[in-house]
Image (cartoon, grey):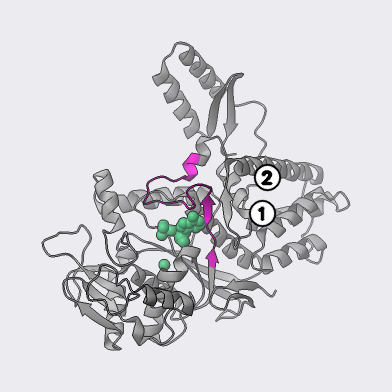
Amino acid sequence: MNFRIYNTMTRQKELFRPLKEGEAGIYTCGPTVYHYAHIGNMRSYIAEDGLVRALRFLGWKVKRVMNITDVGHLVSDADTGEDKMEVGARREGKSAWDIAKFYTEAFFRDYYALGCAKPDVICPATDYIQEMVDLGLALEKKGFTYPIAGDGVYFDVSKLPDYGKLAGKAHIDGIKEGARVEAVAGKRHPADFAIWKFAAIGEKRQMEWDSPWGRGFPGWHMECSAMAMKHLGDTIDVHCGGEDHVAVHHTNEIAQSEGATGKPFSNYWMHVRFLVTGDEGKMSKSAGEFLTLESVTKRGYDPLSYRYYCLQTHYRKQLEFSWEGVEASARGLDGLRALARKVKTEAGAPAELDKGAKPYLDFTAALADDVNLPAALAVLWETLKDGSVPAAQRLAFAQAAEEVTALDLFRAEAAGELASEFMAMIKDREAARKARDWKKSDELRKALSDKGVLIEDTPSGTKWKLTRG
Ligand code: AMP
Ligand code: ZN
């Protein structure tokens, strides 16, 4: 099956030609674990999961690597400001290491709740300091770096003729013209970036290591170059991330990797457009105000309703967040599941999947066209509804499609009745509320929510909803 992917590097859809026939090596920039991931971040991971699942469905053997940024991502992209991990540590009065552990776990809880498949390799940056030092040494040997006393070791972008090719020449010229050699005195070019930062004299960082250049920590972009090449080779098939990474992070990853190896770093670049929230424009972790998956589930929505919400918009279109949209998706998903259950009841057992039939062909064609999941979902809807196709065929197709959509299509209906144990808890809570015992009422709400039963107090009484099947 021919798969076409939009490549940010060439700004067109291209036929996907992996390095090794039948295999795909994919690198995804993972979370910076100094805070919860917001639903914007999760849009990117859901889209990237879509790529992985689509390729697997189309027959590729995929190796997917995701890093965890647990050191070195500074508050400013201009190599100044504090390390985000240290910011998190100060905010919460914990060690940077505890912050990393806590938010890595929180990230994967959300990630899996959203139906995303486990990456084949998950690599925290702090486990690869040596690899980053080695990469820095290779760059130094080739004359790409220069030190700035008391600050760090910098990559000299003027030494790489095609520096900035991912973002486009206009962008790099813009940086030149802007000529704000931001804050870092001694940078030769505004776009030069740190590959190693020294720990400030007299200041003890929580995360710092010895290096041939002095004690300190790696520049943020180093981890992705070092780990991608370690796990996938000097050249990889697809590199993914959100659109914000084009201009700086991925541009600098390319500079480091290609500077060191002289080979192309990634053959395809996939970038997910942002989820934006009307008034603020974008979700911002550093501003402290952002929506998380918990904001969604607290309102009684199944995490997979958010997945469905994201899958309905192609990843290269900006997605404007709205609660109305999430509500509509929740209803849509309920409807899709009801249809799937109906077909299953009608069919009893699936027929053998007919890969020559229209639903399968249309579905694969949608996936093969730059992971067009909205179109693939439309095929799923149409097929489930199409009474002219035998139910056993429709069931076989829907079961296969579920490998990609991962929407828990056949989840048992949230029956009209809850298990009596939960009903008793809801009754107890109602009694506690009447008695104005808010503490007990909150405890019961939490106990129910931990078991997957979300409750909502409405004028007509307590309503409940299951968050898992
Ligand atoms: P971070 O944890 O900030 O390093 O970001 C993790 C991933 O989320 C990266 O791929 C970012 O490009 C992506 N990202 C950040 N903000 C958004 C957003 N509003 N919408 C979609 N993706 C985003
Ligand atoms: Zn990265």
Region in magenta: 271-295
Q: Which mark is residue 357?
A: none
Residue 224 locus on image (x, y percent): 39, 70
Residue 419 higher or lower than 78, as above or below: above
Q: Nearer the viewer, residue 53 or 353?
A: 53
The quadrant in which residue 92 appears is: top left
Q: Residues within 10 Å of mark 2 (few under 14, many from 20)?
A: some
Where ligand 2 lies, by image quadrant? Answer: bottom left
In this rendering, does residue 117 appear at all?
A: no
Q: Which mark is residue 410?
A: 2
Q: Report helix, strand or loop for mark 1.
A: helix
Disc 2 residue: CB within 8 Å of ligand 1: no
Residue 172 locus on image (x, y percent): 42, 77
Q: Report helix, strand or loop for mark 2.
A: loop
In this rendering, does residue 116 appear at all?
A: yes
Residue drawn where x is 66% and y is 73% of the image: 3
What residue did someone put label 1 on? 402
Q: Image check: 143 left or right of 376? A: left
Identify which amino acid the numbered label 2 is placed on.
Phe
Q: Nearer the viewer, residue 243 or 34?
A: 243
Residue drawn where x is 62% and y is 68% of the image: 55
Disc 1 residue: CB within 8 Å of ligand 1: no
Residue drawn where x is 50% and y is 16% of the image: 428
- Residues at marks 1 and 2 touching, judged by CB atoms closer than 8 Å: yes
